[in-house]
Amino acid sequence: MSVSTSKTIQDLFDPKMQAAVQKEVPFEGSTYYMVEQTSDVEAARSLIEVTNGVPRLITAEMMPGDPALSTVPDQVLRALLPDVDFRLSPSTAAAPPGFTRPRTKEEVRALVLQVAKQKVGSDDMDSGRLSPPETNHGHLACAWAVNRIVNFALGQPVGGGLSTTEMGRVLKSKDIVIDGDEVLAGMIIISPTAGTNIGHVGIRGEGGLIYSNSSSHGQWEQNKTIDSWISYYGEGKGLAVLHYQLDPARFPGPVTS
């Protein structure tokens, strides 16, 4: 369906992205629209409900574990994406057995940065092929990609599942927010989705470079700089631009003999 046939919902789209209605499900007097929004780097699948001609954004990031989906009937969710269990909760993995050696902040950053750079263009960061079905062949895989990079580097993911909103909550509750000149390579940069504006997450590199998943290419890339990120997500979309030092206490290293 073309978005032009659903003008009542267009005010709930991110104005800086292309949008297409993928499915329309009528249910008990309401109609639910699943909308995919895309740009070169970020993307999202959003859910809008229209009741009595009044549109309401249920969630801008339609991912498993999203508490906003608790109000949506199971019949609707199954009709929209029958292969996805939206009632699953995003998890924050515990350290695997044998990972008990303390790491320093410097070590955590260095390991994350090393893997972020090494995995550019790598087959095992091919989100179009490897990411779960909820990401629509890697188009919605920015959180998946950062979790995967951190898992490669530190033995477990950041947490928050596939959503920038949920990852933002995990980072806020478990890690260390960093401002200004204290931001260093190897930290997480995130602009969580807020309202109708779709966010993104990546990893800071040296010299202001940023590594993240490309929704259009389905691949891990060096595709942003801090200046372009602030201009687009901060100034252009009005989203927060946050940096986090991953807390070494929750990313211990493997015990070595």
Image: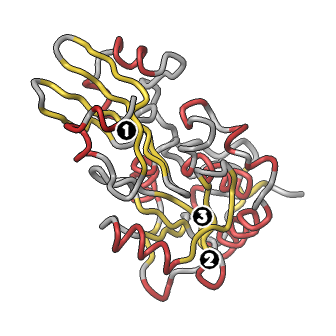
SS state under label 3: helix
Left or right of residue 194: residue 28: left
Residue 187 position within the rendered picture, expressed as x and y whole percent measured from the top left = 57, 70
Amino acid at pointer 2: Leu
Amino acid at pointer 3: Pro
Amino acid at pointer 1: Ser
Give the distance between the C-alpha atoms of the residues marked 2 and 1, in whole angstroms.
29 Å
Q: Quadrant of residue 254?
A: bottom right
Give the distance between the C-alpha atoms of the residues marked 3 and 2, in whole angstroms.
23 Å
Answer yes or no: do the residues labelled 3 and 2 have beta carbons within 8 Å? Answer: no
Left or right of residue 255: residue 31: left
Give the distance between the C-alpha atoms of the residues marked 1 and 3, in whole angstroms.
34 Å
Residue found at x 45% / y 44%: 44
Left or right of residue 216: residue 117: right
Q: Which residue is labeled 1 in the image? A: 46
Of all residues, the one furthest to the right in this rendering is 257
| Vertical placement of residue 186 versus 87, above or below | below
Q: Which residue is labeled 2 in the image? A: 209
- 10 Å crowding of disc 1: few (<14), some (14-19), many (20+): many
- 10 Å crowding of disc 2: few (<14), some (14-19), many (20+): some
Q: Earlier in the sequence, mark 1 or mark 3?
A: 1
Name the mark nearer the viewer: 3 or 2. 2
Residue found at x 62% / y 33%: 132
Residue 117 position within the rendered picture, expressed as x and y whole percent measured from the top left = 75, 67
Residue 198 position within the rendered picture, expressed as x and y whole percent measured from the top left = 39, 53
Q: Which residue is labeled 3 in the image? A: 248
Colour setting: secondary structure
Q: Earlier in the sequence, mark 3 or mark 2?
A: 2
Name the mark nearer the viewer: 1 or 3. 1
